[in-house]
Image (cartoon, rainbow, N blue to C red):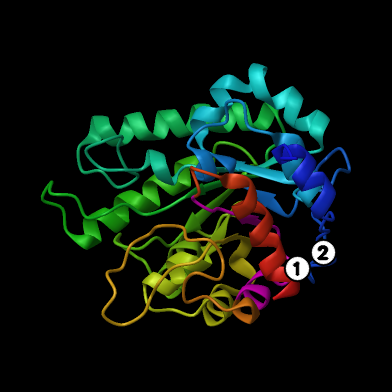
Amino acid sequence: MRLTRREFVQGTVAAVSATALGVGPVFGKEGVAMTPAINPVYLTGSMENWPLGELAAMGYRGLELPPECLDRTSSWLPAAKKAGLRPLCINALPDLCPYLTGSLSDAVPYRRRSTLDRLLQTLELMRKEDIPFLVVAPSRLAENYQSPAEARSLLLESLRELAGAGDTTILLEAAPFRLFASSQEIAGVVDEIALPNLAAALDVGHALLVGENPSPAATTLGARLKYVQVHDADARPGIPLLDRHLPLGLGSLSKEEVKSAVGDLPFAMSITAPNDPIPAARAALEWLVHK
């Protein structure tokens, strides 16, 4: 007899707590644990019809989502909360693409203004739902005739506006193939702005792709680091560097590096598996705990 996905998950997977992963749980304002979290949009490309109860049965407690998911809160958020999942983070990196949606350092004023306005609207929606973290990143140096110094100046100006718009924590994350991709550069930007609600996020897969091991990168960020994103990347010499968000264990990442980078911080899994996401979501937690 063939089992349904729900029957398979409930029959074979024990819930994994943050304590079992060696980290402490993170609690929302309602006293509900919000980590470990997962980004189901990376898994499937959509929040629609996602079996949120199966994620909760595995041990996931939080959600990391792109900004557009907040536009559909009436359809999925009550179901997510009922299943035991709370939005932990809004990841705006997909929205920060020059010449597609804009960037925080765009040299064209109206484009940068449009980007900031979208993110400010996102922050308003986040405050209504008590979502604590917004992740942003520096952009590429676009072909609009700006120097790295000019791009950095505009990035600082944009981050000051976002962090000054309320008390939501703005997390600056290094991303491959963009400006200021090292943990040291991210730390320098956070220190220069010096606002209490501007901090850093660390994506362990991104760290590998820019030539950093996650544990030293986390040490460099130090107290600035408030949130960690976990996925694998293939950083072997001679292999094209691609930000594919590989399942854990299929790339160059070690479990010890992940645990050291996460420590007792909130963290989220972001795994791309559009065809059969349930095994990928389950395997991510199993890899951290058992392998």
**What residue lies at 48% left-to-right and 43% top-to-bottom?**
274
Task: Give coordinates of residue 204: x percent, y percent.
Answer: 52, 68
Within 10 angstroms of label 2, few (less than 14), some, or many (20 or more) residues? some
Q: CA distance from mark 2 to mark 1?
A: 5 Å
Q: Residue at x 46, y 47 (%)?
A: 160
> Is 145 in front, or is 28?
28
Q: Secondary structure at mark 2?
A: loop
Quadrant into which the C terminus falls: bottom right
The kind of residue on which mark 1 rests is Asp
The circle on residue 157 is: none
User: Which residue is farthest right?
Assistant: 31
Q: Which mark is residue 24?
A: 2
The segment highlighted magenta reads 258-272
Q: Which mark is residue 264?
A: 1
253 in relation to 283, above or below:
below
Work out which quarter of the rendered image holds the N terminus and state it: top right
Q: Nearer the viewer, residue 224 or 243?
A: 243
Q: In this orientation, which residue lies closer to the viewer: 64 or 238? A: 238
Residue 250 position in % (x across, y down): 50, 69
Question: Quick check: is 144 in the magenta stretch?
Answer: no
Answer few, some or many: residues within 10 Å of disc 1's Cα (few below 14, many 20 plus, some between 14 and 19).
some
